[in-house]
Image (spheres, rainbow, N blue to C red):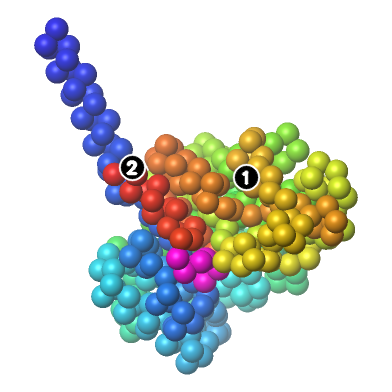
Amino acid sequence: MHKLNYFFLFLLLIFCSKAFAQADGIRVIAYYAGDAERIDNYPVEKLTHIIFSFSHLKGNQLNIDNARDTATIQKLVSLKKRNPNLKVILSLGGWGGCKTCSDIFSTANDRNAFAESVKKLLVDFKADGIDLDWEYPAIEGFPGHKFQPADKENFTNLVQQLRMTLGEKYEISFAAGGFKKFIDESVEWDKVMKEVNYVNLMTYDLVNGYATVTGHHTPLYSTPQQTESTDRSVTQLIGLGVPKNKIIIGAAFYGRMWENVPDTNFGLYQSGKFKKGVDFKNMDSALSINKGFIYHWDDVANAPFLYNPSQKLFVTFDDKRSIWLKTKYVADKGLGGIMFWELGSDSYKDGLLKMIDEVKKSLE
C-alpha cells in the first residue's frame, strides 16, 4: 500500500515538474509599433520578447527608417533594466513593408549582404534577434507586391544565410500566415524550422479586411462555417513535423468591424463591408451596450463578437475570456508561447497582457 502511494506521488511530481517547466517556458511576445515615450506605460516585466515593428529594406540592407525609430529601439533595449530577461527583436517588413523582398532575396549575394546588415544592427543596438515578416513568400500578399514560386526556396536560403551569419547568439524567427494557403505553399517547413528559434503564427486576420462575409478573425477553434482557426493551423504544423515548442500562436489586441451586416445570426457569417479596426483599449468606450452593441460568445470557436442591430455593425475580436483560453491552450498543447499584435493597442492597466500573465502564473 505504501509502495503504491509512493508510486503515485512519484507520478505527481513528474507531472508537476513538467507543468512548471512548460509554464516557465511559455514565451510572451509583443509586437510593438508605438514610439519611445508610450512604452513606459506598459508592464514590460510580463514579456519575454518585444519586437520592434518595423524596419525595412533599403537596397539589400536592413534599414532603420528614421531617428524616431532609432530612439524607439534604443528605448526598448533600455527596458532590460526593468526586465533583465527581456529580448528585443528587430522585425523586417509587415503588411505592405516588404515590396522588394521577392527580388532582393532571390540572389545569394543580396541575401548575404542583408544578413551582414542585420548582424551590424543587432551589434550596434545590442538587440537580440531578427523577425522576418514577409507577407508573403510565393503567394499573394499586399496588393501589387511581387511574389513568385521561387520565393519558397529563397526564403529557406535566406534563413540559412542568417543563421550562418548570426551564429547561435541571436534569435531568428518569422511571422507566418495562420491560414492554410500560407502553410501549404509559402515555407519549406522541415528546412526552415531547423534554423529558426520559433515561428510567430499570425492566427488573426483570418477573416481580413477584403472579406465580404463576416466571421471570427481570431478564433481558437474551427466551426462548420469557418475552417480557418488557431487550432487548425497548429494541428497542421504539428502534422508537418514542426516542433511544438517552436510554435507561437497569435492573439489580436484589436477588433475588426464590418458595416451593412444583416440582423441574422447576430451578424455572424453574414454579408458586409469591412469598416475599420478598433484597439482593445478603446472597445469599452467605443463599443458599449449604451451605444447599441450586444456581446455574444461562440462556444464552438471560443471567440467573442459584438453586434449592433440598429446600426448593422458587426465586430470580431479577442477579449479576456478568449485570451485566457488561448494561453491555456498553449500550456495544454506544450506550445512555445503566445504573441500578439500589438502592445500599443492594449490598456495600460488591467489589459489583455495582464490576462496572459495571470494564466501563465497560475500554471507555475
Snapshot quadrant of residue 136: bottom right
Residue 184 position, x and y percent, is: 63, 47
User: Residue 3, how many percent across, how many down?
Assistant: 12, 12
Q: Quadrant of the C terminus?
A: top left
Whether residue 139 is visible, yes or no, is: no
Pinpoint residue 22: horizontal percent, then vertical percent: 32, 43
The foreground one among 99 and 276 is: 276
Structural crowding at the residue carrying mark 1, measured as other residues with C-alpha within 10 Å and reported as few (<14), some (14–19) or many (≥20): many
Up/down of 320 relative to 164, above or below: above
**Circle 1: residue type:** Ala
Image point 73% across, 34% down: which residue?
224
Q: Secondary structure at mark 2?
A: loop
Farthest residue, direction front: 290
Question: At x 56% / y 84%, what residue is drawn?
Answer: 59
For the view shown, which residue lies furthest in the left direction? 2
Range shown magenta: 343-349
Task: Name, please, the residue furthest toward the bottom.
Answer: 67
- Could you give the CA–CA distance between mark 2 and mark 1, rounded to whole angstroms? 22 Å
Q: Residue at x 52, y 66 (%)?
A: 346
Q: Which residue is mark 2?
A: 363
Kind of residue indicated by mark 2? Leu
The correct choice, above or below, for 143 with respect to 252 in the image is below
